Amino acid sequence: MEAKSLGVIGGMGPKATSVFFDMIIEHTAAEKDQDHIDMVILNHATLPDRTGVILGNKGEIFLKEVAKDLKLLESAGVSNIAIPCNTSHYFYNDMQQMTSVNIINMVDETLREIHKRFGAHCKVGILATNGTVSSGVYRKGCEPYNLLLHEPDDTVQEHVMDIIYNKVKRNLPVEPSEFEGIIQHLLDHDGCQCVIIACTELSCIPIQSDVAKNCVDAMSVLVQKSIALSGKTSVFSPS
Protein backbone atom coordinates (compact mmCIF):
# COMPACT_ATOMS: atom_id res chain seq x y z
CA MET A 1 0.00 0.00 0.00
CA GLU A 2 1.16 3.51 -0.77
CA ALA A 3 2.48 5.42 2.26
CA LYS A 4 0.12 8.18 3.38
CA SER A 5 0.51 10.99 5.90
CA LEU A 6 -1.47 11.12 9.13
CA GLY A 7 -2.92 14.19 10.79
CA VAL A 8 -3.52 14.21 14.54
CA ILE A 9 -5.68 16.58 16.55
CA GLY A 10 -4.22 16.25 20.02
CA GLY A 11 -4.07 18.10 23.30
CA MET A 12 -7.12 16.27 24.73
CA GLY A 13 -5.08 15.78 26.89
CA PRO A 14 -1.46 16.47 26.06
CA LYS A 15 -0.15 13.41 27.91
CA ALA A 16 -2.53 11.14 26.03
CA THR A 17 -1.36 12.69 22.75
CA SER A 18 2.24 12.02 23.72
CA VAL A 19 1.42 8.38 24.49
CA PHE A 20 -0.44 8.05 21.18
CA PHE A 21 2.60 9.35 19.26
CA ASP A 22 4.96 7.03 21.15
CA MET A 23 2.69 4.06 20.41
CA ILE A 24 2.63 4.89 16.70
CA ILE A 25 6.44 4.95 16.66
CA GLU A 26 6.87 1.82 18.78
CA HIS A 27 4.34 -0.28 16.86
CA THR A 28 5.16 0.63 13.28
CA ALA A 29 7.34 -1.99 11.61
CA ALA A 30 10.43 0.07 10.73
CA GLU A 31 14.16 -0.37 10.33
CA LYS A 32 15.04 3.23 9.56
CA ASP A 33 13.60 6.75 9.86
CA GLN A 34 12.11 6.63 6.40
CA ASP A 35 10.00 3.57 7.29
CA HIS A 36 7.95 5.58 9.77
CA ILE A 37 4.74 7.53 9.14
CA ASP A 38 4.77 11.19 8.15
CA MET A 39 2.61 12.92 10.75
CA VAL A 40 1.28 16.41 11.41
CA ILE A 41 0.37 16.72 15.09
CA LEU A 42 -1.64 19.66 16.43
CA ASN A 43 -1.42 19.70 20.19
CA HIS A 44 -4.43 22.00 20.66
CA ALA A 45 -4.45 21.91 24.46
CA THR A 46 -6.76 24.94 24.78
CA LEU A 47 -9.69 23.21 23.09
CA PRO A 48 -12.75 23.47 25.38
CA ASP A 49 -13.20 20.55 27.79
CA ARG A 50 -15.30 17.97 25.94
CA THR A 51 -17.20 16.73 29.00
CA GLY A 52 -18.02 20.32 29.95
CA VAL A 53 -19.44 21.31 26.57
CA ILE A 54 -21.47 18.12 26.22
CA LEU A 55 -23.02 18.33 29.67
CA GLY A 56 -23.54 22.08 29.23
CA ASN A 57 -25.06 21.67 25.77
CA LYS A 58 -22.45 24.02 24.31
CA GLY A 59 -21.01 21.85 21.57
CA GLU A 60 -20.81 24.74 19.12
CA ILE A 61 -17.94 26.19 21.18
CA PHE A 62 -15.86 23.06 20.67
CA LEU A 63 -16.80 22.70 17.01
CA LYS A 64 -15.85 26.31 16.23
CA GLU A 65 -12.35 25.72 17.60
CA VAL A 66 -11.73 22.26 16.17
CA ALA A 67 -12.85 23.46 12.70
CA LYS A 68 -9.61 25.47 12.50
CA ASP A 69 -7.57 22.31 13.14
CA LEU A 70 -9.43 20.34 10.49
CA LYS A 71 -8.83 23.05 7.90
CA LEU A 72 -5.15 23.27 8.81
CA LEU A 73 -4.65 19.51 8.48
CA GLU A 74 -6.55 19.42 5.21
CA SER A 75 -4.33 22.19 3.82
CA ALA A 76 -1.29 20.22 4.98
CA GLY A 77 -2.37 17.39 2.69
CA VAL A 78 -2.85 14.61 5.22
CA SER A 79 -4.73 11.51 4.04
CA ASN A 80 -6.37 10.57 7.35
CA ILE A 81 -7.00 12.26 10.69
CA ALA A 82 -6.77 10.60 14.10
CA ILE A 83 -8.25 12.23 17.20
CA PRO A 84 -7.00 10.44 20.34
CA CYS A 85 -9.92 11.53 22.53
CA ASN A 86 -12.97 9.33 22.98
CA THR A 87 -15.26 12.09 24.27
CA SER A 88 -14.69 14.25 21.19
CA HIS A 89 -16.23 11.52 19.04
CA TYR A 90 -19.63 12.67 20.25
CA PHE A 91 -19.09 15.30 17.55
CA TYR A 92 -17.76 12.84 14.96
CA ASN A 93 -20.44 13.41 12.32
CA ASP A 94 -20.22 17.19 12.67
CA MET A 95 -16.43 17.11 12.37
CA GLN A 96 -16.47 14.80 9.35
CA GLN A 97 -18.82 17.17 7.56
CA MET A 98 -16.26 19.95 8.03
CA THR A 99 -13.52 18.21 6.03
CA SER A 100 -13.03 16.01 2.98
CA VAL A 101 -10.26 14.13 4.81
CA ASN A 102 -11.27 10.84 6.41
CA ILE A 103 -11.47 11.06 10.21
CA ILE A 104 -10.84 7.65 11.77
CA ASN A 105 -13.86 6.71 13.87
CA MET A 106 -12.22 5.61 17.11
CA VAL A 107 -15.51 4.51 18.68
CA ASP A 108 -16.71 2.38 15.77
CA GLU A 109 -13.30 0.79 15.23
CA THR A 110 -13.16 -0.13 18.93
CA LEU A 111 -16.62 -1.71 18.93
CA ARG A 112 -15.80 -3.57 15.72
CA GLU A 113 -12.74 -5.02 17.46
CA ILE A 114 -14.81 -6.07 20.49
CA HIS A 115 -17.36 -7.80 18.25
CA LYS A 116 -14.54 -9.58 16.44
CA ARG A 117 -12.92 -10.81 19.66
CA PHE A 118 -15.88 -11.42 21.96
CA GLY A 119 -18.85 -11.85 19.61
CA ALA A 120 -22.39 -10.47 19.61
CA HIS A 121 -24.41 -10.13 22.83
CA CYS A 122 -21.23 -9.59 24.83
CA LYS A 123 -21.76 -7.51 27.99
CA VAL A 124 -19.28 -4.66 27.72
CA GLY A 125 -18.26 -2.40 30.59
CA ILE A 126 -17.09 1.12 29.80
CA LEU A 127 -14.52 3.23 31.63
CA ALA A 128 -14.69 6.80 30.36
CA THR A 129 -15.41 10.41 31.27
CA ASN A 130 -18.87 11.52 32.34
CA GLY A 131 -19.11 13.25 28.97
CA THR A 132 -18.46 10.07 26.99
CA VAL A 133 -20.82 8.00 29.13
CA SER A 134 -23.66 10.52 29.21
CA SER A 135 -23.37 11.33 25.50
CA GLY A 136 -24.34 7.76 24.62
CA VAL A 137 -21.76 7.63 21.83
CA TYR A 138 -20.68 4.10 22.80
CA ARG A 139 -24.21 3.03 23.71
CA LYS A 140 -25.46 3.95 20.23
CA GLY A 141 -22.35 2.51 18.64
CA CYS A 142 -23.02 -0.88 20.26
CA GLU A 143 -26.38 -1.32 18.51
CA PRO A 144 -25.15 -2.36 15.03
CA TYR A 145 -22.87 -4.97 16.64
CA ASN A 146 -25.51 -6.31 19.08
CA LEU A 147 -23.28 -5.56 22.06
CA LEU A 148 -24.71 -4.87 25.51
CA LEU A 149 -23.15 -1.79 27.09
CA HIS A 150 -22.88 -1.66 30.89
CA GLU A 151 -22.26 1.74 32.46
CA PRO A 152 -20.62 1.88 35.93
CA ASP A 153 -22.64 2.87 38.97
CA ASP A 154 -22.21 6.37 40.39
CA THR A 155 -19.53 5.35 42.92
CA VAL A 156 -17.34 3.66 40.34
CA GLN A 157 -17.87 6.48 37.82
CA GLU A 158 -16.84 9.06 40.41
CA HIS A 159 -13.67 7.06 41.08
CA VAL A 160 -12.90 6.93 37.34
CA MET A 161 -13.36 10.70 37.00
CA ASP A 162 -11.07 11.28 39.97
CA ILE A 163 -8.31 9.26 38.31
CA ILE A 164 -8.74 11.08 34.99
CA TYR A 165 -9.04 14.68 36.17
CA ASN A 166 -7.26 14.75 39.53
CA LYS A 167 -4.37 12.43 38.71
CA VAL A 168 -3.55 11.79 35.04
CA LYS A 169 -4.46 15.27 33.76
CA ARG A 170 -2.49 16.78 36.65
CA ASN A 171 0.45 14.52 35.82
CA LEU A 172 0.23 12.84 39.22
CA PRO A 173 1.10 9.14 39.65
CA VAL A 174 -1.61 6.50 39.51
CA GLU A 175 -1.13 3.08 41.06
CA PRO A 176 -1.94 0.58 38.31
CA SER A 177 -3.51 -1.68 40.94
CA GLU A 178 -6.09 1.04 41.65
CA PHE A 179 -7.18 1.10 38.02
CA GLU A 180 -6.99 -2.67 37.71
CA GLY A 181 -9.30 -2.96 40.71
CA ILE A 182 -11.98 -0.96 38.90
CA ILE A 183 -11.67 -3.18 35.82
CA GLN A 184 -11.87 -6.33 37.96
CA HIS A 185 -15.00 -4.97 39.67
CA LEU A 186 -16.75 -4.64 36.31
CA LEU A 187 -15.71 -8.17 35.34
CA ASP A 188 -16.39 -9.97 38.62
CA HIS A 189 -19.14 -7.96 40.30
CA ASP A 190 -21.03 -6.64 37.27
CA GLY A 191 -20.58 -9.68 35.05
CA CYS A 192 -18.96 -7.93 32.11
CA GLN A 193 -17.11 -10.09 29.61
CA CYS A 194 -15.06 -7.21 28.28
CA VAL A 195 -14.16 -3.68 29.41
CA ILE A 196 -13.56 -0.77 27.04
CA ILE A 197 -10.80 1.58 28.14
CA ALA A 198 -12.60 4.51 26.54
CA CYS A 199 -10.56 7.45 27.77
CA THR A 200 -7.09 8.17 26.45
CA GLU A 201 -5.97 9.34 29.90
CA LEU A 202 -6.77 5.87 31.23
CA SER A 203 -4.78 4.41 28.32
CA CYS A 204 -1.72 6.03 29.88
CA ILE A 205 -1.93 3.68 32.88
CA PRO A 206 -0.06 0.37 32.43
CA ILE A 207 -2.01 -2.74 33.40
CA GLN A 208 -0.96 -6.36 33.78
CA SER A 209 -1.52 -8.77 30.90
CA ASP A 210 -3.93 -10.97 32.86
CA VAL A 211 -6.20 -7.93 33.28
CA ALA A 212 -5.58 -6.51 29.80
CA LYS A 213 -6.75 -9.72 28.13
CA ASN A 214 -10.33 -8.83 29.08
CA CYS A 215 -10.00 -5.21 27.92
CA VAL A 216 -10.06 -3.43 24.59
CA ASP A 217 -8.16 -0.15 24.72
CA ALA A 218 -9.61 2.38 22.28
CA MET A 219 -6.23 4.12 22.05
CA SER A 220 -4.53 0.91 20.92
CA VAL A 221 -7.26 0.31 18.34
CA LEU A 222 -6.80 3.84 17.00
CA VAL A 223 -3.04 3.33 16.80
CA GLN A 224 -3.40 0.12 14.81
CA LYS A 225 -5.96 1.62 12.41
CA SER A 226 -3.83 4.74 11.95
CA ILE A 227 -0.81 2.63 11.03
CA ALA A 228 -2.80 0.50 8.58
CA LEU A 229 -4.42 3.46 6.83
CA SER A 230 -1.00 5.09 6.51
CA GLY A 231 0.18 2.13 4.45
CA LYS A 232 2.41 0.66 7.11
CA THR A 233 2.48 -2.61 9.05
CA SER A 234 1.59 -2.79 12.73
CA VAL A 235 3.75 -5.01 14.91
CA PHE A 236 1.14 -5.57 17.62
CA SER A 237 -2.51 -6.46 18.10
CA PRO A 238 -4.58 -4.11 20.31
CA SER A 239 -5.16 -5.36 23.85
Image (cartoon, rainbow, N blue to C red):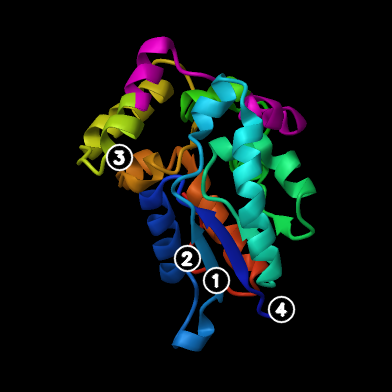
Say whether disc 2 or disc 4 marks the residue closer to the N-terminus.
4
Depicted 65 relative to depicted 22: above or below:
above
**For mark 2, what is the residue?**
24
Say whether disc 4 or disc 1 marks the residue closer to the N-terminus.
4
**The disc label shown at residue 201, or none:** none
| Amino acid type, residue under disc 2 in the picture | Ile
Please state the horizontal and vertical placement of residue 228, each as a whole percent of the image.
63, 66
**For mark 1, what is the residue?**
39
Tell me if residue 124 can be seen.
no
Of discs 2 and 4, which sits in the foreground?
A: 2
Quick one: quadrant of the N terminus? bottom right
Please state the horizontal and vertical placement of residue 147, each as a whole percent of the image.
66, 28
Q: Quadrant of residue 108?
A: top right
Spatial distance from mark 2 to mark 4, Cα to Cα? 18 Å
Q: Is residue 169 left or right of residue 149?
A: left
Say whether disc 3 or disc 1 marks the residue closer to the N-terminus.
1
Please report contact status of discs 4 and 3: CB closer than 8 Å, yes or no: no
Q: Quadrant of residue 176?
A: top left
**For mark 3, what is the residue?**
168
Say whether disc 4 or disc 3 marks the residue closer to the N-terminus.
4
Spatial distance from mark 3 to mark 1, Cα to Cα? 25 Å
Say whether disc 2 or disc 3 marks the residue closer to the N-terminus.
2
Q: Is residue 198 left or right of residue 202?
A: right
Q: Residue at x 30, y 47 (%)?
A: 206
**For mark 4, what is the residue?**
1
Q: Residue at x 79, y 47 (%)?
A: 97
Depicted 193 relative to depicted 73: above or below:
above
- Helix, strand or loop at label 4? It is loop
Q: Quadrant of residue 188?
A: top left
Which of 225/72 is in front?
72
Check disc 3: other Cα within 10 Å, few if <14, some if 14-19, many if 20+. many
Q: Residue at x 56, y 53 (%)?
A: 222
